[in-house]
Image (spheres, rainbow, N blue to C red):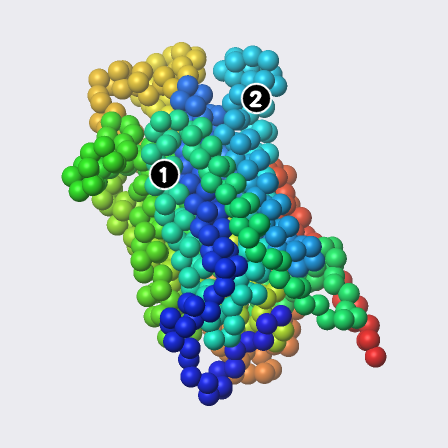
Amino acid sequence: MKPESDSSSGDPPMPFMAQLKSFDGTYWWCNWMELIERFAYYGVRAMLPVFMVDSLGKGGPELTQIEKGNIFAFALVIQSFVPILSGGFADRYGYKVNIAASTVLKIIGYLIMGYTLPLSEMLCGMPLAEARAKGADSAYEIFTLGLLFLALGTAIFKPGVQGLIANRVTEKTTALGWGLFYQMVNVGGFVGPLLAGYLRVLDYEYVFLACSGAIALNFIPLFFFEEPAHKHHKGIELPGPGRMLLDSVRGLLEPRLFFYTIAFCGFWLMNQQFFDILPNFIDDWVDSRDAANFLRSIIGETRVPVVQDGNLPQEWMLNFNSLLISLFAFVAGYFTGKFKPLPGIIAGIIFTIIAIFCLTGSMSGWWILLCIGLYSVGEMTAAPSNLGYLSRIAPEGKKGQYMGYSNFTVGIGASIGSIIAGHYYENNCDKVVLARRYLVDKMNVDKAQVDGISKADLLPFFHEKLGMDSFQARQVLWDTYEPYSLWYLFGAIGLGSLCALFLYNHVISASEKNPGHSFNTRGSFWVKAFLIPLSVILVITTILHFSVGLLLNTLFFCMMLVFALTPQKPALSNN
């Protein structure tokens, strides 16, 4: 492990250009690989929410919102929890092997997802529409497999490339070195969805092919730098994957970390919906013709892709977030660095909650862009403050482990949020579902007739029945069923998380002033007292609304409960 910088050192800071010149070829190759990996990942990820539920006739697998939420939850658990083990894999077997393995997995994932329809038709031996009617298709399972390959590859990639960066920077260049590295994340995350917005207008398949081809470029740098030497302490046996997992779970039972993780889960539960369900909301409900025309007047009519009678692709709308973060992340980091982490987290959540509630206000594309801007301020404020807080409360020698716990928080909150969002959107917000409901309930069209209309043909039929264009019909459904109520739900969850953090902050402040405070003397008891009802609730919910993602969360919390109730054996002394 690299020693932390000594703030007491009297050495003058290294000049900017001298720092840049100190970075060797391996460092710059790592930046290249990160940019390419994020370009490919976000290019596909930005498109997936709409692709997954799009009709068979338009090239999508036509999954339900509930199925989409369950798949995302499963993938988020894998992507968030596996880095605990993959970091040890990189240390033990080498960073280059780690990166190569992740690249292979990601290519397989992109190709499986892109060819879900033909693979399903090949397996069932008939057209997918016919197989779907007979309940014989495997599109759900095939697509899930592809996304899990992508999630696993993503989880494995990060420890490898970050380990290489950590080996190339010094105490004097660490701030600039990591700052440049994370800027590559922003650049790749901005350019990928731009390309996806173009290509998916032509054909979804092109997005998957472009991203699988792009990520394959990451094999090239592996031939141009040497594997760094791995420093291990002699006589100390590295823990195996099972021991690392057990130690990590036990570490989460530390009272301050445990209750912070639970309180902050609500933020990620709310936050993830900007990437999992807002794309569908924009695609279903938002009128962004004015924004599209404005962009066309600036950069050219042929350079701006449009969908659905002149709307901007949702990938371009949401990319406003990546643009703002690319431009202002350093500024936000500078200002949040002037305050303690916990107030920064609370401020970020407040901005995000305001953005969530504002999404209920209008279907205007400009209004939605304003909401995305507010959300971006919240993200830039809360995310770095979260890492800063975990670093602050980490015991000496465990800062790296506590940084890994940020993945737990994301995985738990985001995966449960995806399940909630999928069920709520399917029943209360999906435009096709609501159009079917309106035809039956308000226009007295025979339900059997409505159910027999394919998803691709349903909205044209609905528009014809109403005698309205697509935007007028959209307004009718908006006023009748209020699909924006989705954001009231997640705004309320965000408020609950905010209240929990206020309470947490109050308790922690009191415990720091009073060594005899119950949180200090009986912290483990309060962890057990919270885990027991939480585990029971999760078990009951999993039985009633089964999904693999929910099952994994339930097993994880039940395992934590078992560990909390089982005394830890003292470590054997080496003396």
Q: Are marks 1 and 2 in contact (CB under 8 Å)?
A: no
- Residue drawn at (42%, 41%) of the image: 43
Between 541 and 416, the residue placed more toward the observer is 416
Q: For this view, does 213 lie left or right of residue 227?
A: left
- Residue drawn at (35%, 27%) of the image: 202
Quarter of the picture containing the N terminus is: bottom right
Question: Which numbered circle lies on residue 195?
Answer: 1
Quarter of the picture containing the C terminus is: bottom right
Badge 1 crowding class, 10 Å Cα cut-off, few under 14, some 14 to 19, many 20 or more, is many
- Across and down, in percent, residue 437 comes to 37, 23
Residue for badge 2: 120
Does 390 sit above or below residue 151?
below
Q: CA distance from mark 1 to mark 2?
A: 27 Å
State whether residue 204 appears in this view: yes
Between 3 and 478, the residue placed more toward the observer is 3
- Across and down, in percent, residue 284 comes to 33, 32
Q: For this view, does 560 lie left or right of residue 450?
A: right
Q: Earlier in the sequence, mark 1 or mark 2?
A: 2
> Looking at numbered disc 1 in the image, what kind of residue is underneath it?
Leu
Indicate the secondary structure of the residue bearing disc 2. helix
Foreground mark, 1 or 2? 1
